[in-house]
Amino acid sequence: MTSLVSSIGTLLLRELVTLRKEIEAYPSDADLWKVVPGITNSGGTLALHLTGNLQHFIGAVLGGTGYVRNRDAEFALRGLSRKELVGLVEQTTAALTRTFGSLTDAVLAGRYPEPVGKVRVSTGDFLVHLEGHLGYHLGQIDYHRRIITGTSALPGSLSPGQLVSAEPEE
């Protein structure tokens, strides 16, 4: 039987692989930072936000990594290269891999250590929320990249074959 910890961890790590592929699919560093009418955040801004969010809420709070988040900088910083953003994704992936290696389903059933949005929630509920948040912004990055590049090519898919419970069809 698949544990909830391994399922959530696998989903988050799968999406981080896709985030990396999305960043790498931009034709230039400058394209990552373009803002188009009707869209507030660039792909680069969303990538900074996602890595900061996950490094804080999972890496620092649950994994004790010591990461210190600067949320304002996630939305103000501009001009990082694709290579620098990929480096942040790799750091985030490493932090999540370490953290999920030490979590148990019992931890997920307990309260998340910090209030979130002025409420207390279970760790499991909050991790599911973070997975949805990552997927939401990953879709925004994909559409931003398509608008900027004028192409609908998909750099990577979110394959069900990467799920913990995936088995070959009989």
Image (tube, rainbow, N blue to C red):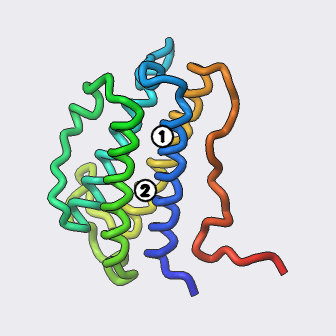
Residue shown at 39% from the left, 37% from the top: 83
State the separation of the CA atoms marked 1 and 2: 12 Å
Q: Nearer the viewer, mark 1 or mark 2?
A: 1
Is 131 or 78 nearer to us in this picture?
78
Amino acid on which disc 1 is placed: His
Circle 1 Cα neighbour tier, 10 Å, few/some/many (<14 / 14–19 / ≥20): some
Instruction: Give me the disc on residue 137.
Output: 1
Amino acid on which disc 2 is placed: His
Which residue sits furthest top?
37
In this view, 48 is above or below 159: above
Is 156 or 125 nearer to us in this picture?
156
Which residue sits furthest front?
83
Q: Identify residue for label 2.
A: 129
Is 87 or 72 nearer to us in this picture?
87
Q: Is residue 55 left or right of residue 67?
A: right
Residue shown at 84% from the left, 81% from the top: 170
Find numbered disc 2 in the image and state the secondary structure of the residue it sits on. helix
Circle 2 Cα neighbour tier, 10 Å, few/some/many (<14 / 14–19 / ≥20): few
Residue 125 appears at what percent x and percent y? 40, 65
Residue shown at 59% from the left, 30% from the top: 143
In primary-sequence order, the first of circles 1 and 2 is 2
**Quadrant the N terminus occupies:** bottom right
Residue 124 appears at what percent x and percent y? 39, 69
Find numbered disc 1 in the image and state the secondary structure of the residue it sits on. helix
Residue 31 appears at what percent x and percent y? 47, 20
Quarter location, residue 145: top right
Quarter location, residue 30: top left
Q: Is residue 13 left or right of residue 102?
A: right
Instruction: Kindly indicate whether the residue at mark 2 contacts the one at mark 1 (C-beta within 8 angstroms).
Output: no
Residue shown at 47% from the left, 52% from the top: 16
